[in-house]
Image (cartoon, rainbow, N blue to C red):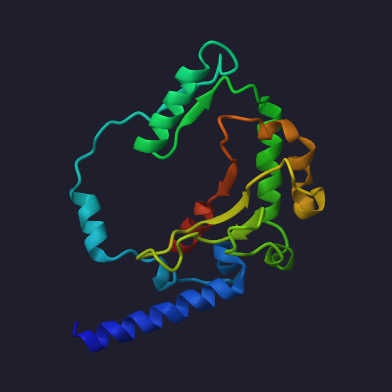
Amino acid sequence: MDCEQEDASAYVRAKELKAFDETKTGVKGLIDSGIVNIPKIFVRPPEELSDDSNRSQIDRQVPVIDLDGIHGDLHDEIVDQLKSASETWGFFQVVNHGIPLEVLQEMIKGITKFHEGDAEMKKLFYSRDRTRKVRFNSNFDLYRSKAANWRDSLGIASINDLDPKEIPAVCSNLYTHTHIYIYICSLSIIIRIRVFKDLIKIIF
């Protein structure tokens, strides 16, 4: 492919990305619109797929951080574990965090209701403005990645100084259960839901 063709291809992709972003409904909006083919912006380049298939499978264990003792003698040790996991992995699993299972289940229900909710309601929260405390969008790196991911995200950055009215009504239970936003070494909670089941429906 010569430079002129590459420029044209990049231009078309940029237009498709912008058009998708401006719908403000994410991948769930694509499903609801009745699409039968996956848009090209979600298709990964062949060279990336080839790299993945050539990689050897390595057994790895996601870091598990036990928070029991975070407010006692083990505080510094646990903080070091969190720091190490963040630097080397970027994510980790926590246990003994003190959050009741029913609270976690209610949190998931609230987020699910949002993602499956009315498109016009979700558009009110759609933004790429990182200063917004409550933000819904699809692919935080939409304009930078080689291929978009099949995901929509609702992020709630902080609960401490958040007006309850800023939270979507269908997620009001998230504010009611304020103790799910406990202080864990200054970590913010970002909740993400992926709709792979809908992607499977398109493929098959």
Residues 103 and 70: in front is 70
Front residue (pair 166, 118): 166
User: Relative to residue 67, is residue 145 drawn left or right?
Assistant: left
Is residue 119 rendered to the left or right of residue 13? right
In the image, is residue 67 above or below residue 23?
above
Q: Where is residue 23 in the image (x, y as percent from the top left)?
A: 60, 74
What x and y, as percent, mark residue 89?
A: 37, 37
Q: Position of residue 91 (x, y in %)?
A: 44, 37
Q: Residue 96, located in which quarter of the rendered image?
A: top right
Residue drawn at (26%, 82%) of the image: 6
Q: Relative to 152, is 7 on the left or the right?
A: left
Of residues 108 and 142, the one drawn nearer to the viewer in this rendering: 142
Residue 155's place in the image compared with 46, above or below, is above
Residue reaching furthest top?
73
- Going 60% across and 63% down the picture, which residue do you hit? 129
Quadrant of the drawing holding the C terminus: bottom left
Query: How many callouts does the rendering have?
Result: 0
Is 138 displayed left or right of 122 in the figure?
left
Residue sitting at x 76%, y 34%: 177
Which of the 4 image quadrants contains residue 9? bottom left
Coordinates of residue 37 in the picture (x, y in percent): 45, 71
Image quadrant where one finds the N terminus: bottom left
